[in-house]
Amino acid sequence: KSSDDYKQFFEKVLEQDDFQPESILSDFESGTIKTIKELFPNTVHRGCLFHYGQCIWRHIQENGLSTKYDDDDNFRLNVRKLLSLPFVPASEVIETFELIADEFDDEADTLVEYYEKTWIGEKKKQGAGRKKPKFNNELWHVYERVINDLPRSNNSVINANKSRKNHRK
């Protein structure tokens, strides 16, 4: 799944039709994001909420925190709070994250650090503010989408494609 693969895919789509979508909803693969920015600079690009959750769950698994998630009610609740941050008004995300981060025990430091670097940006060592996160807030934040009754995931598209495939059989 390299940037070149995504670029080839989108270029094929563009060859078939003058495809200029108003918005694109995708996963959080760096190659996808880079290609969409390059080929569709005027298109609103958003990340899929389902894939946001998968990124966090994958980090939990890769860092040996799955058992803690299963056994520790407080840890599980705090993870769910992190998963709910996309629904918080954008102006309140950092403050809310900091409140949630304080509720985790030391064993969860890797998760808190990952979330901070990846989703909101870690604090600058000097001066005020935060560094740029791996994924810009506009990509994963769904508060406005909820208020405007827009899709938060691409599940409806996936289900429609499955339905079409089954209908053809």
Image (spheres, rainbow, N blue to C red):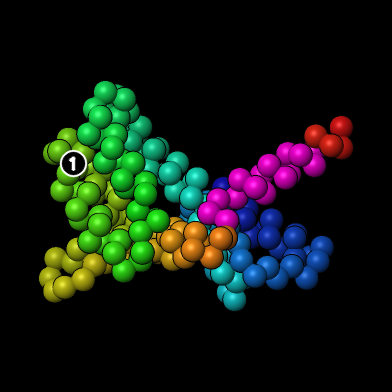
Where in the figure is residue 120, as x and y percent of width and height? 31, 60
Residue at the image point whose x is 69% and y is 56% from the top? 9
Q: Is residue 134 visible?
A: no
Q: Nearer the viewer, residue 30 or 163?
A: 163
Residue 97 among those drawn in magenta: no
Q: Can you say whether 57 is above or below 24 in the image?
A: above
Instruction: Judge left or right: residue 147 versus residue 4.
Output: left
Q: Is residue 17 left or right of residue 111?
A: right
**Is residue 138 shown left or right of residue 43?**
left
For label 1, the residue is 104
Q: Residues within 10 Å of mark 1 (few under 14, many from 20)?
A: some
Quadrant of the image occupied by residue 168: top right
Q: Which residues are magenta?
A: 151-165
Q: Is residue 23 visible?
A: yes
Extreme residue in the right direction: 168
What is the quadrant of residue 125 in the picture? bottom left
Residue 100 in the image: state x and y as whole percent: 22, 49
Circle 1 — which element? Answer: loop
Q: Position of residue 93 (x, y in %)?
A: 30, 61
153 drawn magenta? yes
Q: Quadrant of residue 77?
A: top left
Looking at the magenta stretch, what is its main secondary structure? helix
Relative to 73, residue 55 above or below? below
Q: Amino acid at mark 1?
A: Phe
Which residue is drawn at the image coordinates 26% and 23% (left, top)? 71
Residue at horizontal 44 percent and vertical 66 percent from the top: 138
Does 98 sit left or right of 3 as displayed? left
- Foreground of the two, 143 or 35: 143
Residue at position x 76%, y 39% from top? 163
